[in-house]
Amino acid sequence: MTDTTEASGDVTDTSEDVTDATDTTEPPQPRETVEVSVTLNGESVTQTVDAGTFLSSFLRRERYLTGTHRACESTTCGACTVLVDGDPVKSCNVLAAQVDGSDLTTVEGLADDDGSLHPVQRAFWDTHGLQCGFCTPGMVLSSIALLEETDDPSVDEIRTHLSGNVCRCTGYTKIIESVKRAAGATDD
Amino acid sequence: MTESGQRVDPSSEQTDERDAHEAGTGEDTLVGDRVNSYDGRRFVTGHGEYVDDIESPDMLHACFARSDVASADILGVDTSAAAAHPGVELVWTHADVADHVDEPFGYMLDDEVVLADERVVYQGQEVAVVLAVSRQAAREAADLVEVEYDAREAVTSLDAALAEDGPVVHPDLDADPETDTDGNVAWSGRVVAGDHEDPLADADVVVEGTFETNKTTPAPLDTHGCVAEYNPGSGTLELTSSTQMPHLLSVEIAAVIEGLEQRDIVCRLPDVGGGFGIKLDPFPFEICAALLSMETERPVKHVLDRTEEFLAGRGRAPVRLDGKLGVTDDCDIVGIDVDMAQDTGAHAAYGVAVGYSAANCGQGPYRIPNQHWDTSVVYTNVMPTTAVRGFGDPQVTFMREQLVEMAAAELGVDAVDLRLQNAPRQDDMPMRSAAGHVWRNSDVVTCLERTREMANWDDHRDGGRTREGKLRGVGMGTIMKRGGNKSASGGDFDEAVVKMNREGDVTVLTAVASIGQGTETAITQLVADTLGVAVDRVDAVRGDTDATPEGLGVWADRGTIIGGSAAARAAEDLAETLSAVAGHLLDVDPETVELVDGRAQDATDPERFVAIPELANVAMLGNPETLGPEDERPERLRNGISLVGRGKYQSQEVEFVDPDTGRGNVAHSYTFGALAVVADVDPRTGDVDVVDVAICEDIGNAINPKLVEGQVQGAIVQGLGEALYEEYAYDEEGTLLNGSMIDYHLPTAEDVPLITNTDKLENPDPTTSHGQKGVGECPLVPVSAAVANAVADATDVRFHSLPLSPQHVLPELVDAGLREL
């Protein structure tokens, strides 16, 4: 994946992605637009966007995937979390250009084609790990990333992992219980 | 669907419930079951539609230019650079809107303008509005609006606001004999009971203190926003707004915009990502979006960003309370005497109601015969405050519950015992409190006893040390929270319609809004239960002034009490029709027909039944071939069999408070409870770590225990954020210093304990459809008081102000000689 770290918005390693890399003798020239090729929820997508387009805007405005929410636009709240090559990334401060070549998963890509829910989605719904639903996509994706790393995380591991995702409704208890329950379901 | 199933045991829910819900077998239909959230499937799959998700090709985007300063005269506004910015359609200032609006406006006091005119009264106030082809272009252009200010002295504290001859925030209102405004005092009132001139006369022990609460925002993740679309052909305005009160919003907007009547405005709800009170007022963004759409005849979206939300999204009023509590040597609380000043910021919004409600309910769950409360709502040059979860109760509870524990210490008695002695007895109910509340059926005594036990009060009390060397203590707070209110709206009512199609599917039309609290889920349960159908055959249409009958929205914990009772009545109306049809078909008395498990059956012989879908089809078609000739049918089955049920619930219990005494039954019902906090104080850093929270409330019959738990847990954690971290910080000029989620810390999963030590009593309210009482706001009310009492128990230091964050706690520990390095 590109060197896209959560909360950094760091663009230093991506200059090749937004400039013409074939001619190394000329200084890089800024472009108005950039072509982005990604695997988005399992489908190959290639699209030309304004170079300054954030990943969250790319998903919401260009791909109509409005399940990626924006609430702080300062990488604090985590409502915009998506998976970039499996890692949770806050898409509000990452340029679409930075994820060129990546495998992206948004909340819309989790359920099976037949509509059956991902075990983590199922657990959040059944455990009531959601109320208004605004933080939910980010919480679900962040939890999936945790469970990819750790089969059966402890409560404290879950609390730490989710500390970059703010929820104003649930008080977190049922979110943490949802992750525990999903871990159990995954074991099955 | 027609086969009856075993009712799922709530205690063994999980797998059964999941399977049942997934399969749509309808076993989770009953009131009291742990049914999954109605909206949950859409939300976990990312298919909610919040206001910013709404897009159309011809949509324009609005953005405000906001004041950089808190208090200034406006000498001029130059919009030329903004208007020339690429993509900008138009830029408006006050002069452009003045002829189209009735100003000043406001929810309770007329003290607001849509765009600043001659002066700005807080940093973040709307000065100009830009309309552009994209949100980004509008934002960029808004930054190009040049405003020339002549600075005035800003009023940024209660002391400055109440000083003789100090600057006045609203000189026009002060000078206007038609308003109550006197200097910076927007409104003042009192609550008096018993010997109010000397309420402490009978006391042997008087404890007193001055307490100050913090200004906070409930910070719903989904910011305020709307889409306005005016149809010039019909002359109607469609306003889809992230609001808690669609019907009232149409009333409020019609009152401001010239030429629009309520009937010309259709208010609809998107999914609303949290409200917590601050989505009740009519806002300038809604008014401007409406006017801009009327001007351009195109849809206009106006969504605030997080910075705007912090500057102007409104929040909880800080209150200063000078309080005295009088107790006899025999531990009877005999009097309370309080002077409270509420810093409402630059506008009153719901502030007047917050003020009188706080004083009226200030006695809490105690019998206090002699009371004197003076309340003033005071203007300052900072962001307006308004309704926030708990209304004024958390502030006044912060004072009262500390005074109670101070009195217990003075008397040398246990603080829970003192509370128990003064709590009303369920046996004495129904009864009137001294301030006029009608308490019908609550057992606060058991709530107190259970909470003491759940928190291991007796073990933790009087402080101790943890193995890590922290100072540990336990403290309590109590709840006597009103549910419903009519003083602000003229009545407390909701209507509902429940309709069935020919296949037996049900739709309930309700005026309640969904802001995450789950009222719609409870309503679908009430309806399903009454009609004997599976809950997943019931859909809810919410808060749409075109489609749903009138109601007042969600605030004051009224949704399930009032809106739920209305929906239950509508379902009963339809159930009577279904029973009449089934009785006719089965040739039994409709009175003996029961609707259960998807069937209408003869209660005396359940093998004789009609499946609901079949029944609905027969009734909807209404043919003589199936029902017989019309003149041979029962009266109810002639002239068309309507599968539409209607219901209305109008509170006959709630009263307007008496303007002179402040007394009255301010709410429809009251929820009582107790909450205890165990807190560790780090003597090295001043950090307060809440390690356990125990709560027991009497919430009446729980319609959905799972959603109740969610509300309780969420409210407690919101309260912990306010108690431990959050405060608006302004400099002397009224400039906000921490207006971002980086600088204003909201609690995260790492900051708070799991909230699982929860219990409830279910003493039903006798007036509501299923005995339900209010739930959602209540658990927040006692949190800051309980935290302060726990810290006092741990340290012997009494904290009089919020939040209890290290920068405030550590200096006090130093002064008390408790600081350790």
Image (cartoon, coloured by chain):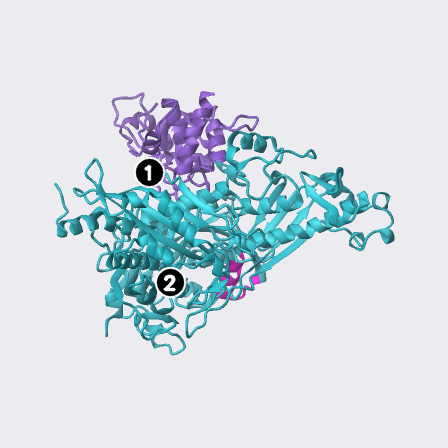
Chain colours: A purple, B cyan
Label 1 secondary element: loop
Find residue A113 and report its horizontal and vertical position in percent. 55, 26
**Residue name at image x 50 percent, y 67 percent:** B655
Is B430 rendered above or below residue A12?
A: below
Task: Tell me which residue sits at (68%, 39%) in the image.
Answer: B598
Quarter placement of the C terminus of chain B? top left
Residue position for label 2:
B363
User: In the rendered image, is residue A50 in sight?
Assistant: no
* Percent position of residue B57, x then y: 51, 43
The amino acid sitting under disc 2 is Gln
- Quarter of the image with the N terminus of chain B is top right
Q: Of the residues tagged 2 and 1, which is closer to the observer?
A: 2
Query: In the displayed structure, does residue B563 sit left or right of residue A152?
Result: right
By secondary structure, the bulk of the magenta-drawn segment is best described as helix
Question: Is residue B637 located in the magenta-colored stretch of the structure?
Answer: no
Q: Is residue B249 magenta?
A: yes
Which contiguous range is marked in magenta? B247-262
Task: Say which quarter of the image contains residue B162.
Answer: bottom left
Instruction: Identify the residue at horizontal 24%, vertical 51% (top origin).
Output: B792
What residue does disc 1 label? A75
- View extreme (front): residue: B330
Q: Amino acid at mark 1?
A: Thr
Marks 2 and 1 on same chain = no
**Residue B355 seen in this snapshot:** yes
Of residues B592 and B742, the one nearer the viewer is B592
Badge 2: how crowded within 10 Å, few (<14), some, or many (20+)? many
